[in-house]
Amino acid sequence: MLFRRAHIIRHVPVYSQYALRHVRHETTKIPASKSGEYFNAEETEKQISLMQRDTRLAMSNQDYDHAVEVCEQLRTLVIEAYGEDNPILASTLNNLGLAHKGLGQFEKGAQMQAKAAQQYEACGMRNHDSTTTGLHNLGVCYKEHAQNSGTAAMERVMLLDQSTNCLREALERREVAKAKLKYKENPQQSDEDAI
Protein backbone atom coordinates (compact mmCIF):
# COMPACT_ATOMS: atom_id res chain seq x y z
CA MET A 1 0.00 0.00 0.00
CA LEU A 2 1.11 3.53 -0.67
CA PHE A 3 1.14 5.85 2.29
CA ARG A 4 0.78 9.54 1.74
CA ARG A 5 2.65 11.72 4.17
CA ALA A 6 -0.16 14.26 4.34
CA HIS A 7 -2.79 11.71 5.35
CA ILE A 8 -2.84 11.11 9.06
CA ILE A 9 -5.09 8.57 10.66
CA ARG A 10 -7.44 10.03 13.17
CA HIS A 11 -9.09 7.50 15.36
CA VAL A 12 -12.64 7.18 14.11
CA PRO A 13 -14.78 5.53 16.77
CA VAL A 14 -16.84 2.64 15.53
CA TYR A 15 -19.98 2.40 17.62
CA SER A 16 -21.58 -0.76 16.50
CA GLN A 17 -23.87 -3.44 17.72
CA TYR A 18 -22.30 -5.83 15.21
CA ALA A 19 -18.51 -5.36 15.19
CA LEU A 20 -15.91 -5.65 17.93
CA ARG A 21 -15.48 -2.39 19.76
CA HIS A 22 -11.79 -2.55 20.67
CA VAL A 23 -8.74 -3.91 18.87
CA ARG A 24 -5.55 -4.25 20.91
CA HIS A 25 -2.21 -4.93 19.32
CA GLU A 26 1.40 -3.84 19.13
CA THR A 27 2.54 -2.18 15.90
CA THR A 28 5.31 -0.16 14.38
CA LYS A 29 4.25 3.40 13.72
CA ILE A 30 5.17 5.22 10.51
CA PRO A 31 5.79 8.98 10.89
CA ALA A 32 3.18 10.81 8.86
CA SER A 33 4.07 14.43 9.50
CA LYS A 34 6.47 16.77 11.25
CA SER A 35 3.92 17.36 13.99
CA GLY A 36 4.69 13.98 15.49
CA GLU A 37 1.42 12.33 14.54
CA TYR A 38 1.70 8.80 13.20
CA PHE A 39 0.02 6.77 10.51
CA ASN A 40 -0.67 3.41 12.04
CA ALA A 41 -1.17 1.12 9.04
CA GLU A 42 -2.06 -1.98 11.03
CA GLU A 43 -4.64 -0.18 13.17
CA THR A 44 -6.13 1.48 10.08
CA GLU A 45 -6.46 -1.83 8.25
CA LYS A 46 -8.14 -3.42 11.28
CA GLN A 47 -10.56 -0.52 11.63
CA ILE A 48 -11.41 -0.70 7.92
CA SER A 49 -11.94 -4.45 8.14
CA LEU A 50 -14.22 -4.13 11.17
CA MET A 51 -16.22 -1.35 9.56
CA GLN A 52 -16.61 -3.35 6.32
CA ARG A 53 -17.82 -6.35 8.33
CA ASP A 54 -20.18 -4.10 10.27
CA THR A 55 -21.58 -2.74 7.00
CA ARG A 56 -22.16 -6.24 5.60
CA LEU A 57 -23.90 -7.37 8.78
CA ALA A 58 -26.09 -4.27 8.91
CA MET A 59 -27.05 -4.76 5.25
CA SER A 60 -27.86 -8.44 5.78
CA ASN A 61 -30.06 -7.44 8.74
CA GLN A 62 -31.66 -4.72 6.57
CA ASP A 63 -30.48 -2.06 9.01
CA TYR A 64 -29.79 0.41 6.21
CA ASP A 65 -29.64 3.51 8.42
CA HIS A 66 -26.79 1.96 10.40
CA ALA A 67 -25.11 0.82 7.17
CA VAL A 68 -25.20 4.40 5.83
CA GLU A 69 -23.73 5.73 9.07
CA VAL A 70 -20.87 3.21 9.08
CA CYS A 71 -20.18 3.70 5.35
CA GLU A 72 -19.90 7.46 5.83
CA GLN A 73 -17.41 6.95 8.67
CA LEU A 74 -15.54 4.40 6.57
CA ARG A 75 -15.41 6.74 3.60
CA THR A 76 -13.84 9.46 5.76
CA LEU A 77 -11.31 7.02 7.22
CA VAL A 78 -10.32 5.59 3.81
CA ILE A 79 -9.88 9.02 2.22
CA GLU A 80 -7.74 10.22 5.15
CA ALA A 81 -5.61 7.08 5.07
CA TYR A 82 -5.22 6.35 1.35
CA GLY A 83 -6.55 9.29 -0.62
CA GLU A 84 -9.29 9.42 -3.26
CA ASP A 85 -8.27 6.80 -5.85
CA ASN A 86 -8.37 3.35 -4.33
CA PRO A 87 -10.58 0.27 -4.57
CA ILE A 88 -11.49 0.34 -0.86
CA LEU A 89 -13.17 3.69 -1.38
CA ALA A 90 -14.94 2.34 -4.47
CA SER A 91 -16.24 -0.62 -2.47
CA THR A 92 -17.40 1.72 0.29
CA LEU A 93 -19.25 3.92 -2.22
CA ASN A 94 -20.90 0.85 -3.74
CA ASN A 95 -22.08 -0.30 -0.29
CA LEU A 96 -23.27 3.21 0.50
CA GLY A 97 -25.28 3.18 -2.72
CA LEU A 98 -26.83 -0.18 -1.83
CA ALA A 99 -27.77 1.13 1.62
CA HIS A 100 -29.42 4.25 0.15
CA LYS A 101 -31.28 2.05 -2.34
CA GLY A 102 -32.45 -0.11 0.59
CA LEU A 103 -33.84 3.04 2.22
CA GLY A 104 -35.69 3.91 -0.99
CA GLN A 105 -33.33 6.82 -1.75
CA PHE A 106 -32.81 5.69 -5.34
CA GLU A 107 -31.24 8.86 -6.73
CA LYS A 108 -28.62 9.04 -3.99
CA GLY A 109 -28.02 5.29 -4.32
CA ALA A 110 -27.49 5.57 -8.08
CA GLN A 111 -25.16 8.53 -7.59
CA MET A 112 -22.99 6.56 -5.14
CA GLN A 113 -22.92 3.47 -7.34
CA ALA A 114 -21.96 5.50 -10.40
CA LYS A 115 -19.11 7.07 -8.39
CA ALA A 116 -18.04 3.59 -7.29
CA ALA A 117 -17.83 2.37 -10.90
CA GLN A 118 -15.82 5.47 -11.82
CA GLN A 119 -13.49 4.88 -8.86
CA TYR A 120 -12.87 1.27 -9.89
CA GLU A 121 -12.03 2.43 -13.41
CA ALA A 122 -9.70 5.13 -12.05
CA CYS A 123 -7.84 2.32 -10.26
CA GLY A 124 -7.33 0.47 -13.55
CA MET A 125 -10.03 -2.10 -12.88
CA ARG A 126 -12.21 -1.55 -15.96
CA ASN A 127 -13.19 -5.21 -16.52
CA HIS A 128 -12.72 -6.39 -12.94
CA ASP A 129 -15.57 -8.25 -11.24
CA SER A 130 -15.98 -5.42 -8.71
CA THR A 131 -16.53 -2.89 -11.49
CA THR A 132 -19.02 -5.07 -13.33
CA THR A 133 -20.83 -5.79 -10.07
CA GLY A 134 -21.00 -2.04 -9.42
CA LEU A 135 -22.47 -1.46 -12.90
CA HIS A 136 -24.96 -4.27 -12.30
CA ASN A 137 -25.96 -2.72 -8.95
CA LEU A 138 -26.40 0.64 -10.68
CA GLY A 139 -28.65 -0.96 -13.32
CA VAL A 140 -30.75 -2.65 -10.64
CA CYS A 141 -31.04 0.65 -8.75
CA TYR A 142 -32.35 2.38 -11.90
CA LYS A 143 -34.79 -0.48 -12.46
CA GLU A 144 -36.13 -0.40 -8.90
CA HIS A 145 -36.44 3.39 -9.10
CA ALA A 146 -38.46 3.01 -12.29
CA GLN A 147 -40.74 0.48 -10.59
CA ASN A 148 -41.36 2.87 -7.71
CA SER A 149 -45.03 3.86 -7.78
CA GLY A 150 -44.22 7.57 -7.47
CA THR A 151 -42.18 7.70 -10.67
CA ALA A 152 -43.67 9.58 -13.66
CA ALA A 153 -44.12 7.68 -16.95
CA MET A 154 -41.43 9.50 -18.95
CA GLU A 155 -38.95 9.28 -16.10
CA ARG A 156 -39.75 5.58 -15.80
CA VAL A 157 -38.87 5.07 -19.48
CA MET A 158 -35.57 6.94 -19.06
CA LEU A 159 -34.68 4.99 -15.92
CA LEU A 160 -35.44 1.66 -17.60
CA ASP A 161 -33.29 2.70 -20.56
CA GLN A 162 -30.42 3.61 -18.20
CA SER A 163 -30.92 0.31 -16.38
CA THR A 164 -30.72 -1.65 -19.63
CA ASN A 165 -27.56 0.20 -20.67
CA CYS A 166 -25.83 -0.45 -17.32
CA LEU A 167 -26.80 -4.12 -17.24
CA ARG A 168 -25.71 -4.59 -20.85
CA GLU A 169 -22.37 -2.86 -20.16
CA ALA A 170 -21.80 -5.04 -17.08
CA LEU A 171 -22.51 -8.18 -19.09
CA GLU A 172 -20.19 -7.13 -21.93
CA ARG A 173 -17.37 -6.36 -19.51
CA ARG A 174 -17.81 -9.72 -17.79
CA GLU A 175 -17.55 -11.45 -21.15
CA VAL A 176 -14.31 -9.57 -21.91
CA ALA A 177 -12.89 -10.50 -18.51
CA LYS A 178 -13.91 -14.12 -18.98
CA ALA A 179 -12.27 -14.25 -22.42
CA LYS A 180 -9.05 -12.76 -21.02
CA LEU A 181 -9.04 -15.29 -18.20
CA LYS A 182 -9.63 -18.15 -20.62
CA TYR A 183 -6.72 -16.93 -22.76
CA LYS A 184 -4.41 -16.68 -19.73
CA GLU A 185 -5.28 -20.23 -18.67
CA ASN A 186 -4.67 -21.77 -22.09
CA PRO A 187 -3.39 -19.39 -24.80
CA GLN A 188 -2.98 -22.13 -27.46
CA GLN A 189 -6.57 -23.34 -27.16
CA SER A 190 -7.90 -19.77 -27.42
CA ASP A 191 -5.79 -19.21 -30.58
CA GLU A 192 -7.22 -22.39 -32.11
CA ASP A 193 -10.77 -21.25 -31.26
CA ALA A 194 -10.11 -17.97 -33.08
CA ILE A 195 -9.16 -19.82 -36.32
Image (cartoon, helix red, strand yellow):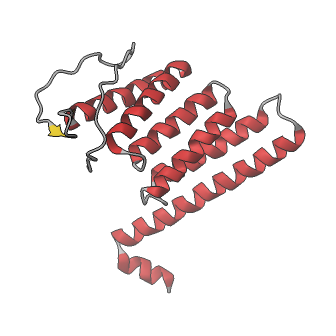
Q: Is residue 62 visible?
A: no
* Percent coordinates x, y for residue 8 in the rendering: 28, 36
In the figure, is residue 64 to the left or right of 188?
right
* Above/below status of 194 relative to 154: below
In the picture as drawn, the residue positioned furthest to the top comes out as 17
In the figure, is residue 184 to the left or right of 111?
left
Q: Nearer the viewer, residue 44 or 19?
A: 44
* Above/below status of 102 relative to 160: above
Q: Nearer the viewer, residue 85 or 126?
A: 85
* Percent coordinates x, y for residue 178 in the rendering: 47, 63
In the figure, is residue 87 to the left or right of 176?
left
In the figure, is residue 61 to the left or right of 18?
right
**Image-quadrant location for residue 47:** top left
Q: Nearer the viewer, residue 38 or 106?
A: 38
Q: How many marks?
A: 0
* Percent coordinates x, y for residue 48 in the rendering: 33, 32
In the picture as drawn, the residue positioned furthest to the front comes out as 35
Q: Residue at (44%, 24%) from the top-left corner?
A: 70
In the picture as drawn, the residue positioned furthest to the bottom comes out as 195
Q: Residue at (44%, 34%) from the top-left corner?
A: 75
Q: Nearer the viewer, residue 141 or 193?
A: 141
* Percent coordinates x, y for residue 154 in the rendering: 88, 44
Q: Residue at (54%, 61%) from the top-left corner?
A: 173
Q: Residue at (28%, 33%) from the top-left corner?
A: 9
Q: Is residue 158 visible?
A: yes
**Image-quadrant location for residue 156:** top right
